Image: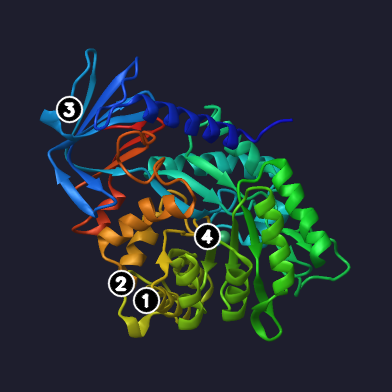
Amino acid sequence: MREPRYRRLFGALIFFIVCALAAASPGAGQKVDGPHTLIVPESVFDAAGGELRQGWAVLVAGNRIESVGPVEELEMPAGLRRIELPGATLLPGLIDAHSHLFLHPYDETLWDDQVLKESRAYRTLMAGVNAERNLLAGFTLLRDLGSEGAGWADLGVRDAIADGLIPGPRMLTATLAIAATASYAPGPRGWDPDLHLPPGAQMVTGETEIRRAVREQAGHGADVIKVYADFRRAVGTAPTFTLAELEALVDEATAAGLPVAAHASSPEGMRRSVLAGARTIEHGSGGTPEVFRLMAERGVVLYPTLAASAAYDEYFSGRDGGWELDTPEAFLSPRIARSLAAVRDAIDAGALVGLGSDVGVFPHGEIWRELAWLVRAGLTPVQALQAATIVNARALGLEGEVGEIWQGALADLVAVDGDPTAGIEAIRDVVFVMKDGRVYLEP
Ligand SMILES: [Zn+2]
């Protein structure tokens, strides 16, 4: 009987915080023996309030935030290490709820060639490098939605990071992901049907096979079940699973204590996923106001993967050059325009929009692009920062642990030069990264 490492880690952390809260008197910081670090930035981003706190500092003890507030009011233990970050904004560690560490941009190598020609060893080592790139760019937690043909290797990368073998963000991993038979790449069209290609996801049909796949993935240690609820078919992008199949998938995942993330961009694929109980919709570019209202009613979060849409069209449109963040609306590609409109429709319907970028389609270490595209879609810079912090923490069931700078939370902290609430581009200039109380980047 071996619990997945992630569960053991978070189980232990939750136990720790419960004990710490029980021992603390209201308003008092929890006292931890051992090294303390005081971080003194220009300002601290209050993700819940959506405001900057000038003159605040954060005291870290071990892997937790011991206290946060005006620097002159913090109780300073002896032997303190002080990190000064003048001119910088301190943020909660950023969270991307849709990454692919095992993919790299398709203008470097086409998806088919990555999956069919790159060895698993090569892809796994590259995933480790990609993990560090994203960490140093300020992302301290990634939900990695499918190893895309690399089997169970994402579990090894997750555990190597958790054990401190290699630097990287905290990882929530999906393993193989689940798709309907002959409804995910490679192919099936364009390939000899007699070829048995290694699949980019676990292909299943019917409730029995679906339950078996969920049990296998959960049993091997997946943190989330990813399902491809629609795919390109003869009629265009259309559902591949029946509602009953998706209900069986969510039922089995729920029994294993796992949430379901549904790849869907057709209205019916999205609708079935939401009705079945998926917690997040990935892409969602074809969402109608009705579907977004349904998502709002059920608290389902949209991850619009805007930066990936822009990258796809840059690679495959045949147009010379890509689309910039300031490209006028009339000159945007139909795909990008549709994805941006979906974000606006989702917000109008009251649905939550989080930060899920599909990084891997575009370069690792550049997830900032998704925040910039969210602002282009109509979010304020503060809302984009909230999408990458508190909204995602809540969507992933980790509220209170990550996504906010507050007493008792995990010490995942990132600083950028300047003020990203005034101009989101500042999110690119990461000058400080701490994860779990350990400093990975400092001036
Ligand atoms: Zn993806």
Q: Secondary structure at mark 4?
A: loop
In the orientation shown, which residue stands out farthest toward the top?
79
Q: CA distance from mark 3 to mark 1?
A: 42 Å
Q: CA distance from mark 1 to mark 2?
A: 7 Å
Residue 26 placement, left or right of 193: left
Q: How many marks?
A: 4
Which residue lies under the disc numbered 2?
378
- Residue kind at label 1, given as amino acid type: Arg
Residue 390 placement, left or right of 335: left
- Disc with the residue nearer the chain's start (1 vs 4): 1
- Count residues near mark 2 (Cα–Cα under 10 Å), then give few for <14, some for 14-19, many for 20+: some
The answer to whether marks 1 and 2 mark residues whose Cβ atoms lie closer than 8 Å is: yes
- Residue kind at label 3, given as amino acid type: Leu
The answer to whether marks 3 and 4 mark residues whose Cβ atoms lie closer than 8 Å is: no
Camera-nearest label, 4 or 2: 2
Which residue lies under the disc numbered 3?
74
Image location (x, y in percent) of residue 183? 73, 70
Which residue lies under the disc numbered 1?
344
